[in-house]
Structures are given as C-alpha cells and as structure tokens.
Image (cartoon, rainbow, N blue to C red):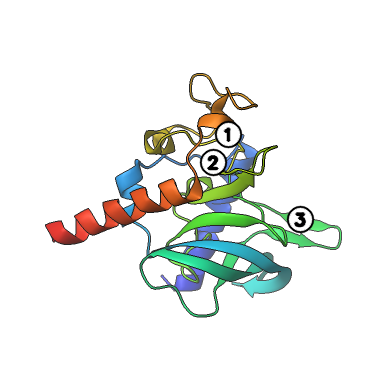
Amino acid sequence: MSDLRHLLLICFGVWAAADAGGTTVVPPDFAQLVNGSDYVVRARVAKVTAEPRTVEGRALIFTRVEFEVLAVLAGAPPRNLVLVMLGGKLGDEELWIGGAPRFAAGDEDILFVSGNGANLHPLYALGHGRYPVRRDAAGREFVARSNGVPLTGVAEVALPLAEEPPGAGPGPRGAAGRALTPAEFAAAIKQTRASSLREK
C-alpha cells in the first residue's frame, strides 16, 4: 500500500471519528509525552497558512504553521520550524480533525512534536502535545493545557482533555494561581528526558 493511500485511509478514519463526536486519543502520561516526542520547544506562532493539496486524487486542506523558537527543551528541532498538519480553512471550505489544536499568529506554546511531515498532525497525541503559555492578571506566566485549563502538576497530562483537576478555577486561589510556570514545566521536561537517556 502506498504512503498516500495509507494517508487517505487514515483521513477517512479521522473524519469518521470526528463525525461520531470527536477523535478519540488515549492521553499519554508525562514520561510518554516527553520521551515519545522527537523534540520539545517553547515557540511563538509567526504565520499560519492554509493550502490545498491533492492526495490520491482528492482535494484536502493542510495548514503550515511557522514558529519562532524561543527555547529548545528536548531534542533537536530544525532551525526554521514549520509544522504541517491536516486541516484548515480555505475560503468557505473547512476541514478539521476533532481534538486537534488550531493555531493563530502570536500564540505562545510549549509543543511536543512527533513525526512532523509524516503524521497527519505533528503534535504528540494531538491536543495533548500543546501547552499554551498564559499570563494572569498580575502578569505571571503559567502553563495551561490545550483546553485552557491551568496545569498544576505534570500528572494532569494524563487526564482526558475534557476533565479538569480538582479545584480548577480562575483567580489566584484557583488553578491559575497554582499552575506551573513555564520554567517549572521546562525543568520537569528536561529532567524526564535526561533520566530516559541515562537508562539507555
């Protein structure tokens, strides 16, 4: 079976899952997320471009997202980071993978990238591979999950994205006030990756 035919069959599977109520993705635990990624970066979206592509004679929409890499947390990303993913909007036509993050210029995230250019979506486990960097009312940076829920500990990576940890809520006494800072999250990523490399 050709790579393109395999890609197309996967596309149909994704659409079927999305039509049934969303793509089902098994949440990874933190070690799986870190060690299963080719590289991990903190990056800011510079440009988002949707473009048509023909796969096995069928017209599809793909999106190219260009990033400014702010920090490399694991692995070795390319100098010019461009992630390519199935889905996007061209004029009145739209195609989206259920559960896949959508990007806009200016977004700042910690990204876990796996199989860019080879997979339908380059983030590990779709939305589980994106962690937006947010700021609270006082200007403190914190890390959220792709559903916007503040990340208060790395164990929460393994929660389904529809769920919130106990005590999640806005304000300094809610989850945002207790959320990990980007520096804390980065330190946990580096420690987990280093431990894995030592074990090998």
Which element is circle 1 on?
loop
Task: Reply above or below: 196 against 136.
Answer: below
- The Cα atoms of the two marked residues, 1 and 3, are separated by 26 Å
Which mark identifies residue 61? none
Q: Amino acid at mark 1?
A: Val
Which mark identifies residue 149? 1
Q: Disc 1 or disc 3, which is closer to the eye?
A: 1
The structure residue drawn at horizontal position 61% and vertical position 50%, both measured from the top left corner, is 101
Residue 35 point in image, percent of width and height: 30, 55
Bin the neighbour count of mark 2 within 10 Å (Cα to Cα): few under 14, some 14-19, many 20 and up. many
The structure residue drawn at horizontal position 62% and vertical position 56%, both measured from the top left corner, is 108
| Residue farthest right in this picture | 92
Q: Amino acid at mark 3?
A: Glu
Callout 2 touching callout 1 (CB < 8 Å): yes
- Residue with the mark numbered 3: 94
Q: Earlier in the sequence, mark 3 or mark 2?
A: 3
Q: Amino acid at mark 2?
A: Arg
Q: Disc 3 or disc 2, which is closer to the eye?
A: 2
Q: Between 46 and 179, which is closer to the camera in this rendering?
A: 179
Q: Taking 40 as reference, is 8 left or right?
A: right
Residue 52 point in image, percent of width and height: 72, 72
- Residue with the mark numbered 2: 145
- The Cα atoms of the two marked residues, 2 and 1, are separated by 5 Å
